């Protein structure tokens, strides 16, 4: 038994249209070749961009190395300058310390001189006071001795005159 199948009429018309609009092998090959060509161009472009990027990165690395070297040199210079400044500051501090010591020594000498002058003044005052005291004591002693001499003279005179119980009178 064989059966025949009938194709509907719209499918027949569609199939005819499909045959008319069918892409030929040559067109497919051209499209495939164009696609491969574009892929090669894109790959080539990406490779050149990668190479250029690598070159740029290398240039940047070199520039960074140079900048690092310059920065290291500048740091060394700054350290040297700081060391020089520290030495200068130490010298200045030492000079100022010496000046301060000299000034302190001068002040100490002045204070010693003033103290010596005051001591001399105090000694002079003490000497004057002692001298006055001695003079007063001598005057008193001479006065007493004069009174004693007078009393002796009076008692001698009285004895010579014959008064035995004569008591001298103070004058």
Image (cartoon, rainbow, N blue to C red):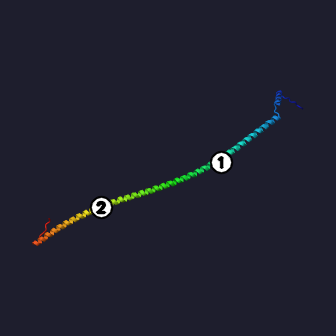
45, above or below 130, in the image:
above
**Can residue 149 be seen here?**
yes
Q: Secondary structure at mark 2?
A: helix
Which numbered dot is residue 118? none
For discs 2 and 1, the disc positioned in front in the rendered view: 2
Among numbered discs 2 and 1, the one appearing first in the sequence: 1
Q: Answer left or right for 81 relative to 36.
A: left
Question: Which residue is at the front of the view, 164 or 151?
Answer: 151
Residue 128 lies in what quarter of the image?
A: bottom left
Q: Answer left or right for 111 relative to 132.
A: right
Question: Which residue is at the front of the view, 20 or 41?
Answer: 41
- Please give the residue where the numbered disc 1 appears in the rendered image: 62
Q: x, y percentage for residue 66?
A: 63, 49
**Residue furthest toward the left?**
162
Q: Secondary structure at mark 1?
A: helix
**Can residue 164 be seen here?**
no
Quarter of the image that includes the C terminus: bottom left
């Amino acid at each position: 038994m064989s059966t025949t199948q009938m194709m509907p009429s719209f499918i027949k018309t569609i199939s005819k249209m499909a045959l008319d609009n069918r892409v030929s092998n040559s067109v497919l090959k051209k499209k495939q070749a164009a696609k491969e060509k574009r892929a090669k161009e894109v790959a080539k472009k990406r490779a050149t961009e990668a190479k250029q990027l690598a070159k740029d990165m290398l240039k940047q690395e070199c520039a960074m190395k140079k900048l690092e070297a310059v920065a290291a040199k500048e740091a060394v210079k700054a350290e040297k300058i700081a060391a020089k400044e520290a030495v200068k500051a130490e010298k200045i501090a030492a000079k100022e310390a010496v000046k301060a010591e000299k000034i302190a020594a001068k002040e100490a000498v002045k204070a010693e001189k003033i103290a010596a002058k005051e001591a001399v003044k105090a000694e002079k005052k003490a000497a004057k006071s002692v001298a006055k005291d001695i003079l007063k004591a001598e005057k008193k002693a001479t006065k007493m001795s004069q009174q004693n001499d007078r009393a002796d003279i009076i008692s001698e005179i009285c004895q010579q005159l014959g008064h035995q119980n004569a008591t001298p009178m103070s004058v």
